[in-house]
Amino acid sequence: MIPVEHIFYVSVSLLVTGVVLILTKRNALMMLMGLELILNAANLNMIGFNQLHKPAWDGQMAGLFIVIIAVCEAAVGIAIILQAYRHYFSSVPDQISDLKDPW
Amino acid sequence: MVSTLVFDPSLVALTLAVILTPLGSALICFFVRGNRRFIPVLACLFIGMAGVGSGVLMARIFPSVAVATIPWFSAGADTIQVGLLLNPYSTVMLSVVLIISAFVHVYSIGYLAGDPHTHRYFSWLGFFTFAMIGFVVSSNLLVTFCFWELIGLSSYRLIGHWQEKKVAARAATKAFMVNRVGDLGFLLALMMLWSHAGTLNIQELSQISLPSPVSTMVGLCLLLAVTGKSAQFPFFHWLPDAMAGPTPVSALIHAATMVAAGVFLLIQLSFLFSPMALLVTSGIGLLTLLIGAWGAFTQFDLKKILAYSTISQLGLMVAAVGMGNQAGAFFHLMTHAFFKAGLFLTAGILIHQFSQPGSEPVQDIRHMSGWSNSNRLLALCLLILGASLIGVPLTSGFLSKELMLSHALENASDSLEWGQVIILILGSVLTTAYTFRMLFYILSPSPDHLAHKAPVILMVPVILLTFLSLFMVVSNSPWAISGWAGAFEPVTPTLSTLFISVATVITGIVFSWLLYKEKPTADFSPRQVPQFFPDWMQQHIFVKFTLAMAEGSRQLDLKWIDGILHTITYVYVTFSFVVGWFDRTIVDGTVSFATHIVAGVGRLFRGLMNGKIQSYIAWGLLAILSLMVWILY
């Protein structure tokens, strides 16, 4: 039985890694990956906390649910990035600046 | 004596015809062009007809009073009436004016033969006569005032008949302007009468007694009008200047129309005067009597001697009214009209004889001697007319002067009234003296001068006027007034009055003979004519005073009014400057400060919105973290 604290250590490291990915990577695909990591860090927390309430399964179920949502989200996000790429020939958000003021 | 006659329609029509005939003559002479010989004769006929009409009126009405009035116009509740008033004074005056005017008309035909402006002359002569008789018979003072102004206007036109001569134009303007001062007095008197008595009708006024201060003020204002029109002190200086007009006009002005109007007004309205105003009137009259006589002494110009003589005689009449002797004043006005007109017409003949055509007329009495042998008739006329002016017995002038003297003697009780009597006698002596001085010069024989005969048309009016200057025209007796003129209820003279009259005449003759002997005719050295102080007064008081006042006003304007304006301007400019500074600095400054703050804040936060999605996320993260920290701790 893995202690809960260890699960939390993993999820925190995943969260920090995701945030750092989002903040540092220029490519939108990489930022989407960081987003997945943050989502999965939350998922790990669900599973970890479920161990503290033994007979219940709802934490496990929520984790399963979040996986499904993450799949959908990734599909939508990749689709948007693909469409943006087809339109702007780039997947870097900084280069997509039509809405920005001219100055 | 007074019994009001109901004015029957035929008499009204006759009076109106008499008034309007001279106007018709004036209009015909003004509008009808063409035959230059025919028009003056027509004018004479018109005036003669009016004269006959006035004679009929006098025969019918004198000595009763006839009035006729019709409403003229209404203003609010007040109605102004226009009407005729024929009391003994105005009836006689009407005839006198028309007789003199007719003679002057006839005389003018001869005197102005060859003048290019005969039409204009005769039209204004007719108009002058019309204005005067309208003035005489009008019963309403407002209408009287209108005619009074017309008299002034026509005298202005006639004095300035030779308008191309600068002297004549200036004299006409002077006469007109001086008369305006008198008109002011007339107008003020009318306003006071209207506000206090409520009527301007002479007959109604005579039945109203005004309170004493009002009647004094009215009297003094009317006296101002009379001094202007009748050339009394201090306004007499226009009359000698008015000699620049044609001589027949001078005769008309001096005898019947212009200056007589003032005295006539005084006689008609003397019932309005308070005792105080009457005293002032007699004072002015006596002063003018002496000044005029003195003025006649200093002159060598024949017409100016006669002009000053008129001033003096008018002073006598005004003084007589002031002493309460209206009948005497009117009597003298009438006799004076005849002999003064005669004297002027004689002077005109002499000037005509001695002047060469195209040169300046000779009017100096030192150059006019030596004709009496060649024209004895004219010399006799001159002598009789002069005697009438002096008041020698058997002339009409004697009767009127005796009347005034006896009235003054009869009423003299205190020292003031005895003083008035002494001045009257002194005036008579002076009158005799200057008249004989003039006669000595003119009638002295000297073989050097040869004069041509006078035309008959000039002689006839002179002879007739000489006849009218004799006693039998006004009285049956040569010593006291009796006959038709007894209707004026004159004072009966005493033997002492007769004695004084004769004594003054003899004294005056001796006095002037002594003076004449001292200055023989050969002395032709130019003599300084003394300036009378009205001219001096006009120059030094009115002109200089006006100029000084103008200068004072200028200084006041420059120093005070401009100073005040400048100060106000400076205050305004300074205040505007301060306000402008406040507006620019404080108000604008506040607004700019606010915009600067907003702009600064905007600049500060604009850096956050840099369009980089990661920085948004980073800020969002920071915000969540700080929120968590805030909630948890």
Image (cartoon, helix red, strand yellow):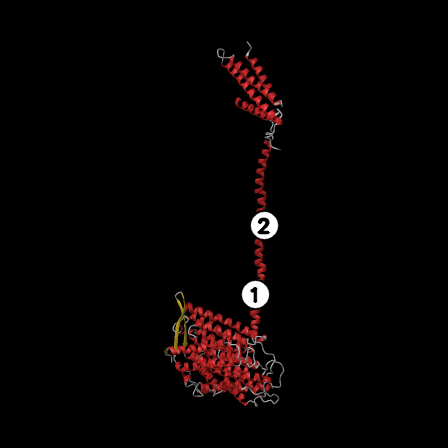
In depth, the one of B356 and B600 nearer the eye is B356
Looking at the rendering, in which quadrant would you find the N terminus of chain B?
bottom left
The residue that mark 2 highlights is B574
Which is more N-terminal, label 1 or label 2?
1
Residue B115 point in image, percent of width and height: 56, 79
Residue B106 point in image, percent of width and height: 51, 82
Q: Secondary structure at mark 2?
A: helix
| Neighbours of disc 2 within 10 Å: few (<14), some (14-19), many (20+) | few
In depth, the one of A3 and B432 nearer the eye is A3
The single residue placed furthest to the top in the displayed view is A1
B497 horizontally vs B614: left or right: left
The residue that mark 1 highlights is B549
In depth, the one of B92 and B165 nearer the eye is B165
| Neighbours of disc 1 within 10 Å: few (<14), some (14-19), many (20+) | few
Does residue B428 appear in this view? no
Residue B413 point in image, percent of width and height: 44, 80
Disc 1 marks a residue whose amino acid type is Met
Q: What is the spatial separation of the Cα atoms under label 2 and label 1, in whole angstroms? A: 36 Å
- Residue contact at pointers 2 and 1, CB within 8 angstroms: no
Disc 2 marks a residue whose amino acid type is Thr
Residue B292 point in image, percent of width and height: 53, 79
The single residue placed furthest to the front in the displayed view is A86
Q: Secondary structure at mark 1?
A: helix
In depth, the one of B415 and B70 nearer the eye is B70
Does residue B243 appear in this view? yes
